[in-house]
Amino acid sequence: MGSITEKLQAIIDSKEDIRTSIINKGVDVPESTKFSDYPTKISSIPTEKIEAPENDVNFYDYDGFRIASYTIRGAQSYFEGCDTLRIDNMPTHTGLTFDGWNWDAMDLVKTSRKYADIGALYKTTDNATHIKVLINNPSIDILNTGLRLGAKISLNVDYGDGTVETKENTSTSATNVIINHTFPSAGFYDVKISITSNPNSTRYGFVSTTSYGYRNYVIKEINIGNNVLLDQSYSLAYLDCKISFPSSVLITGTYCFSYSTIPIVNLPVSSFTTNYMFYYFNGNISLPSSCASFTGTYFSQYSSIKRVIVPNTINTSSVGNTLFNNNRHLEVLSLPMGVTFNTSANTVQNCTYLKEFDVEEGWVPTQNITLSVSSVFKVDGMVRLFNNLGDTRAAITITLGRTNTGRLTSDQIAIATNKGYTIA
Amino acid sequence: MGTTVDKLNAILTTKGNIRTAIIDKGVSVPTATTLSQYSDKIDSISTGPVEAIEKDVNFYDYDGFRVASYSITEAKALTALPTPPTHDGLTFQGWNWTLSQLQNYNRKFANIGANYLPSNGVTRIRIKINTSKEEPFVLGLRVASKSSVLINYGDGSQETKSNTGNSATNYNLTHSYTTNGEYDVSLSRFGNVGTYGFANVTSNHYRNYIIKEINIGQYVLFDQSYSLGYLDCKVSFPSSSFSATCTYCFAYSSIPQVNLPPCLTAFTSSYFLYYFKGAVSFPPTCSTLTGQYLTQYSSLRSLVLPRPSSNASVGNTLLSQNYYLKYLSIPSNFTFSTSSNVLQNCRNITFFDVESGWTPTQNITFNASTCYTIQAMVDFFTNLGTTSSTRTLTFGSTNLGRLTNAQKAIATDKGYTLA
């Protein structure tokens, strides 16, 4: 290769070849893209992902993809002595920065429960909240939702179509504003909500009232940014999309995810006191390994959640039977030491598919428990329950029903009866 | 950026960053690799299939992966159906819709499923044994009269169940494995006569957790209740030589995608998808569509019912309690036989898609859901046939509050009362 001109032309040709190769891998590279941005484009090439099979301990990405899985013993051995949970081959997502798992390594290593669903948290790279919408028919499909603005906060809403709107709250109390935007043409839009002024260090959130919910079908993904507080009812309700959460998000609103279909909700929140959080929710959840309190009513009523693994609680909670009832697809209910049922009625009413009632070692029910609504309890699961139960001096009956107990030997049943329980 | 040197340095920096990005994708890039060779390196990045976004018409692989998707307009203009991914041990037999059926389709939504036959034609059950002593493989096997089935347990042992009687017989198979691991259990006809199926008696269901995948072979007939009940795995179905007539066929199962093959022509079983978790693709047509509690308490998001060859009038129990159902599509010759709440507790229905000319024979209460979009209601009113009877369609004030008088008039001009 000879002259400088020829060398520059070779660089230009190589640039074009690289651009073509990236495009052939399914990534859009507009002609105006700077050469220095090509590495980012290469990073966003989707590579083959092989999902881990479901196991006792599962690590879930925000889109529901199971990144890794272990038996409980395997996980505890693998992470023994680790300060944090580290998983190889973590997926990368354009615009998102991994913000840790919602479980502490210590909680996983120490638990005497069998199950753990651990969720990945993500910050947005620019700290803004991104709402990705798909507009098929711009005369019909609009983005219509509500925003809750904390005191004195100002936001920019960049609709991704050249329109930028300012939403400002000049008062000293929170207020709601409406987003109502029509897009110029069909296509994907990345709506970016960013803070421009926040002298009082307040937060913003969504006010997705039921009257807006019917329009939510245009929303395909939400990446929650920093300084978000979801304190309004139905904040993330009536959605049908993926959602990523940062470790900083706060959720205190009732009906937060009700009526939504979300592949998985990986929550970092420290307190579960809201009612109807997952009411009529379709999807799966990963709750943090520990929290301050777990109360409220109708936590997951009528949901399709497969496994509810209640966090370790700092405060003990005695919860009603409305918390989990009518979870008709619930397979695993896992309880820490601090959470018991305050009613002798059917605490898992209509949980007809429950296979495992997993409790922390030493867990002692304060009421009779009726589990016979399901006839599919696994033998090893029932034995583990009996082994983990603490001794009782009260007259506590655990009703598993004849179909389930018929699979147990008298020795296995004796594990519970020797601790003072009646098995019916 | 200033001098030529600065510019060259920027190019070198970018080259280094591109190299790092390629290496991060699992491709080796020796330092001696020239910039002109980088495009080849990018070409060799192993990309997985990228799932299509959900549209009006979706093509689903047997594991639930959305292979392709189109608007209804795009789909009707297709000249060939898409090609699904390949799977070891499975032969793609086709989609459960033909191109012609799609081109002549008169509704907006369609879920189309891939059917596969195991390459050797026999049923394969993939199991995972964790604790060999506590987890024997247990299966109820139904063998037709004068037929035999060879069961190969995948660990070197096999047995034959022969039914010399004049009626089908159930056998309880129990097999213990000495070593933990994954095994492929195969079921095949012995002697090339008859059919076989599963007889999953309730007392065995609790053991189904060891089953990770089922690939159904030829000559399979599921005529026993709960044949595929209480499962939590992927299931593939062949396009022919398969029948399912049992009640509770998929009850209490969690299956990512059930692609019912076109050879299933009659849906008359009650509780077919009762308490089912997952998604389903029906073939576009069938001979009959009746039964009760077809999808009650299921987690279906989308239900596109096939068009029966003769008119079907069904009760309100067919679809009730589908809490998460968002898309419901029904053919014009499918009506409800009751005026009570046919969509009871279907609280999330957003799109109610009917074939042009659909005329309800009863009043219908839609207001269990407040999620109907304006366009969905307008499309529905537009597709309604004219009624000469007194028919009330109750959408409720929340849904109707979104409509203009002109939009409501599309229905009222056809003789309906909106409430």
Image (cartoon, coloured by chain):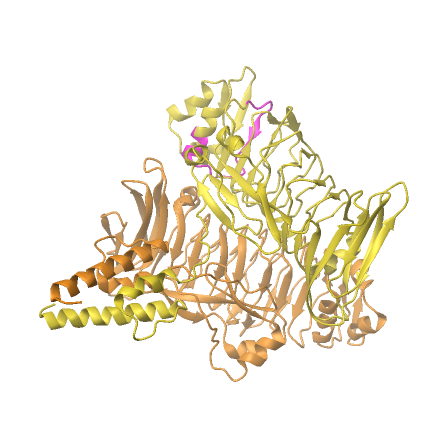
Chain colours: A orange, B yellow
- Percent coordinates x, y for residue A309 in the rendering: 58, 66
Q: Which one is in front, A394 or B238?
A: B238
Q: Pinpoint residue B57: horizontal percent, then vertical percent.
A: 48, 39
Against A256, residue B194 (above or below) is: above
- Specify the principal SS of the magenta part: loop
Look at the image and say whether residue B365 sits in the magenta stretch: yes
Q: Is residue B390 left or right of residue B133?
A: left
Residue A286 percent location from the top left of the image: 52, 64
Q: Which residue is drawn at 47% across and 73% down?
A: A88
Which residue in the rendered view is the most extreme toward the left?
A: B3
Q: In this view, does A410 lie above or below B66?
A: below
Q: What stretch is highlighted in magenta?
A: B359-378
Q: Can residue A59 be seen in this view?
A: yes
Q: Where, quadrant-wise, is the N terminus of chain B in this rendering? A: bottom left
Report if residue A39 lies within the magenta region: no
Q: Which residue lies furthest to the right in this view?
A: B165
Q: Can residue A153 be seen in this view?
A: no
Front position in the image: A193 or B19: B19
**Coordinates of residue B318 in the picture (x, y in percent):** 65, 36
The answer to which quarter of the image holds residue B24 is bottom left
